[in-house]
Amino acid sequence: MEIDTIFKTPFTKLYWHLASKELKKTRSIILVSILIALSIVFETFGKMFPFKPFGRDIYLSFIPLSLIGMLFGPLVGILSGAISDILGFFIFNAGYPFFPGYTLSAMLSLLIYSIFFYRTKITVFKIFLAKFLVNFLINVLLGSLWMSLIIDKAFIVLLVGGALKNAILLPFEVLALYYVFLNLIPILKGFNLISLNIPNKITLF
């Protein structure tokens, strides 16, 4: 059965075939809409009641976005990233004009989450690597580039500040995803939303 197919690598024709089929499922559209809305709620709550370990804000919007990647794969993920960023712009607009670079960043973040979590065994190493790439490649590198273009501030200053912030947040975010996946995998399997072949236990590798 297709629902039980898992992969060690995304570089197969069947992987992308199954990912493309997610775009046509009514269930996918409904659940993605809920998760995007949840990410916006988390973002709103984080801005209203910020949690600041070591003086750095933690926003939990990455959790529902990671679940989109896990449940529906890279094609739905890329589309969801664009939608969530555009909606977020209209909700949280801080006076800056719309900048498509952030939409690209959101799409790439969902692509990374999908590649590491969709139809595959979830491990601590995959969680860490996915979050590391999103934090430093997307948030730090691209985020600093986009911000330097918008506010005309030195790229290297933004890069150093962003790297420090994301390095501090990384262990908290990895731990959060670990416990979310650990508790949700059995539930998602019970609703036939993920493969029964995905282990309930999250191992190191």
Image (cartoon, rainbow, N blue to C red):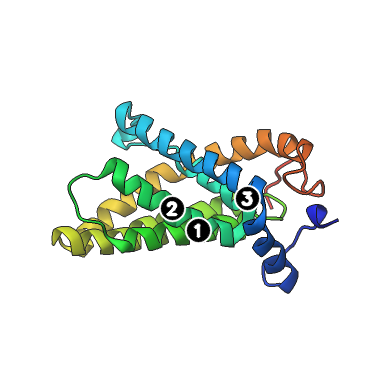
Above or below, comparing residue 90 to residue 132 in the picture:
above
Helix, strand or loop under label 2: helix
The answer to whether residue 4 of the structure is visible from this angle is yes
Q: Nearer the viewer, residue 138 or 79?
A: 79
Report, in whole angstroms, how far the alpha carbon at label 2 lies from the one at label 1.
Answer: 6 Å
Q: Nearer the viewer, residue 179 or 112?
A: 112
Residue 183: give x, y in percent of width and height: 67, 33
Q: Nearer the viewer, residue 145 or 72?
A: 72
Sequence-wise first label, 3 or 2: 3
The answer to whether residue 134 of the structure is visible from this angle is no
Q: Quadrant of residue 55?
A: top left
Residue designated by label 1: 79
Residue 88: give x, y in percent of width and height: 35, 45
Residue 70's tag is 3
Amino acid on which disc 3 is placed = Met
Dot 3: within a 10 Å radius of its alpha carbon, few (fewer than 14), some, or many (20 or more) residues? many
Above or below, comparing residue 166 to residue 146 in the picture:
above
Report, in whole angstroms, how far the alpha carbon at label 3 lies from the one at label 2.
Answer: 17 Å
Above or below, comparing residue 183 to residue 95 in the picture:
above
User: Do tag 2 and tag 1 residues touch (Cβ < 8 Å)?
Assistant: yes
